[in-house]
Amino acid sequence: MLLSVGAEFISEARTQEKYGLVIGTDFNIPALFFDPEAKKVQGELYSVSDYKIDDVDALEGHPVVYTRKTMKICYEEKTVEAFVYVIEDPHEKLLAKMRLEEYKIEDTEKYIPPSKRFPEIKDVEEKRKLLSAQFKSQ
């Protein structure tokens, strides 16, 4: 999805701190949140031009669904600061879900992409509010 906004893949990477990663909502979307009891999370690091960050924010639903934060990420024996999108104050039902150490869309056939969520609703902001409500109730 990030490639659709001109992002360039850099490397597999891992969070320096421990985060919870679970699958939430009716659309099987990954949710990342701070959790000192969890493990470091494996993911992907991308490079995006400064002028494209608004496009990434829109893609990720920031600030309605996710919140963009700066986090230390480790890759190829380097540590860098990068933007990540997290769920703030996750609902207790979301916290109760099984933690993952990694999530890849291509490994998950149940993932429903944004274009297929709430097809009866045309307003993007309304879709984001509905998705955010699902995260807050799970």
Image (cartoon, rainbow, N blue to C red):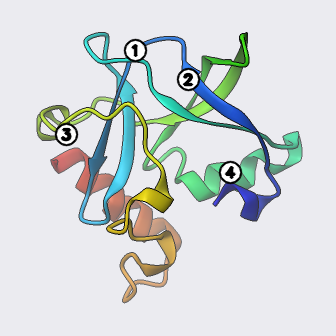
Above or below: residue 136 compared with residue 82: below
- The residue wearing badge 3 is 94
Circle 2: residue type: Arg
On screen, residue 114 above or below 17:
below
- Distance, label 1 to label 4, CA atoms, is 24 Å
Gap between marks 4 and 3, in whole Å?
24 Å
Residue 131, picture quadrant: bottom left
Q: Residue drawn 43% across and 49% down?
A: 65
User: Residue 39 occupies which quadrant of the picture?
Assistant: top left
Query: Which comes before the other along the chain, label 4 or label 3?
Result: 4
The residue that label 4 is drawn on is 56
Identify the residue at image location x=47%, y=70%: 113
Vertical relation: 135 (above or below) 84:
below
Looking at the image, the residue that sits furthest to the bottom is 120
Which residue is label 1 attached to? 18
Q: Of helix, strand and loop, which one carries label 3? A: helix
- Nearest the viewer among 108 and 66 is 108
- Image quadrant holding the N terminus, namely bottom right
Q: Secondary structure at mark 1?
A: loop
- Looking at the rendered structure, which numbered label has been put on residue 14? 2
Percent x, y of residue 86? 45, 34
